[in-house]
Amino acid sequence: MLDHEYTTKDIFRKNFFKDWKKEMTVDERNLLTSLSKCDFNEMSNYFKAQSEARKQMTKEEKLKIKEENERLVAEYGFCVMDNHKERIANFRIEPPGLFRGRGNHPKMGKLKRRIMPEHIIINCSKNSKVPTPPSGHKWKEVRHDNKVTWLVSWTENIQGSIKYIMLNPSSRIKGEKDWQKYETARRLKKCVEKIRNTYREDWKSKEMKARQRSVALYFIDKLALRAGNEKEEGETADTVGCCSLRVEHIKLYPELDKQEYVVEFDFPGKDSIRYYNKVPVEKRVFKNLQLFMENKQPEDDLFDRLNTSILNKHLQDLMDGLTAKVFRTYNASITLQQQLKELTNSDDNIPAKILSYNRANRAVAILCNHQRAPPKTFEKSMLTLQSKIDAKKDQLLDARRELKSSKADAKVKRDEKTKKLLESKKKAVQRIEEQLMKLEVQATDREENKQIALGTSKLNYLDPRISVAWCKKYGIPIEKIYNKTQREKFAWAIDMAEDDFEF
DNA sequence: CTCTGCACTTAGAATTGTTGAA
DNA sequence: TTCAACAATTCTAAGTGCAGAG
């Protein structure tokens, strides 16, 4: 990990050294007193050389490794559930290493221990052949629980939480659950207006609890915020969702940039991704927020009478199966459907239609705040692209100059040869202009996508039937929208949806 | 109502594989 | 043919939400 930024962080180094010392003998512990005096370069270079050697392998060697991998997948990558052979998602055990939490994680650098068969619980049916543990070892337990979907579990040593081996998204059990998720969101569509009217009424409630609940729900609905469960302090990075927002995470502006009642959100969300947004809200919401913030310290809870459990209980009363996260699914999917309607032009060619699809997808990703760190190579690749553009511009200037002199020539000499030359110069200019435009579009597109991740919404929030129906309606091959893995995951939707599907 | 354990979905980074321009 | 850019896949952390005990 020597090259990684993690190793420069104090908490990481402290945690690592503490855990490492526990593994040392007394003599080693006496000898090794400071991490900064330890030189790991010999090990680091060894692994670098290994990875270099792997790159230098011949085609045959690479093929051999590939075949061996395929054999492993064939042997361990599948199971039989309800008489169907199903792909297992994560069948390889997590290797030991140093824990890499996201954001400001208090446990980063701790030693993540090797999992032994003695830690492993196997869950399979009574009549099945229990996998044999590696020789000389035993499983912790073999159980037969058909109320859960996992095949294997163990307790990891950083947070003490349970980890699972489960089926691939293409499996029946995951697919049906996915489908149900979107069906719940579609039921919300039918009653969302009523629910909105209800929470707007509650902004005026005499009860503080109802006011907080209704304002929080407004944010969850309007801004697609996550629910915001409580977290144990000191165990994880300090991140929040809607219900766990603190006073310090919002600022109120009665007027800002010619807009009234603006709320500025600035907080670390899931994976410590920053949520930053300035939102004009209704006056009643604004006044309520002022009320909630009265006599509070920055580190106090904004919604002190509310948590996710209270909110979800209330939602359950409004609609069967309704929870806070359903709003995210609903708003994401409905946004995609609306955007597709708005942006798709039936006269466009296929690439232009796909561009529209990606733009609709991007609108959802922005709504859900799906960001990524700008790739490490972003600046560099942007520069290369820019220099390509510059070179193309120079080329265009040259081509235009040549065209000009060609024209002048053609005026004097009126023979076939000069005429032909003129034509070819014209075409050259045109071709270069097109190439330049393409490069410039690419640059804008890349710049716009710099910090936006489209994958998460596509995989988890957008009802795939919307996309399938759109493809059918406009004659777009489904392969243009979903790659192989995605088509496997969404097989249920591809089977089910016709061109007239409405979310 | 709170606390905890559990099982599941959602998430971006890291790694690996593929492609197409030079 | 090579190599960088881009796409796909893998990895595992970090959320949500529910149940049950007290």
Image: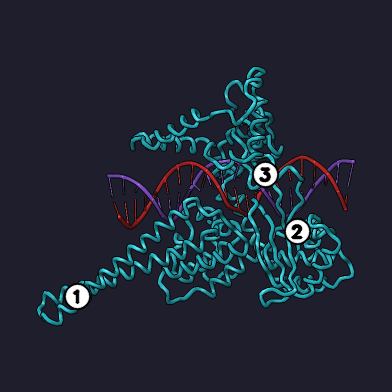
Chain colours: A cyan, B red, C purple
Q: Amino acid at mark 2?
A: Glu
Find the residue positioned furthest to the top.
Answer: A27
> Residue flagged by tag 3: what amino acid is it?
His
Q: Amino acid at mark 1?
A: Ser
Q: Which residue is tagged 3? A: A105
Which is nearer the N-term, disc 1 or disc 2?
A: 2
Q: From this view, report whether residue A145 is shown above or below residue A325.
A: above
Q: Report the chain holding disc 1.
A: A
Q: Secondary structure at mark 1?
A: helix
Element type at marker 2? helix
Tell me the residue at 67%/33% (across/down). Answer: A121
> For mark 2, what is the residue?
A248
Q: Which x, y percent locates residue A274?
A: 64, 57
What is the CA distance from the residue labelled 1 to the residue labelled 2? Answer: 67 Å
Question: Which residue is drawn at the image coordinates 66% and 39% (left, top)?
Answer: A11
State the image coordinates of residue A82 (x, y, percent, origin top left). 61, 44
Check disc 3: other Cα within 10 Å, few if <14, some if 14-19, many if 20+: some
The answer to whether residue A4 is seen in the rendering is yes
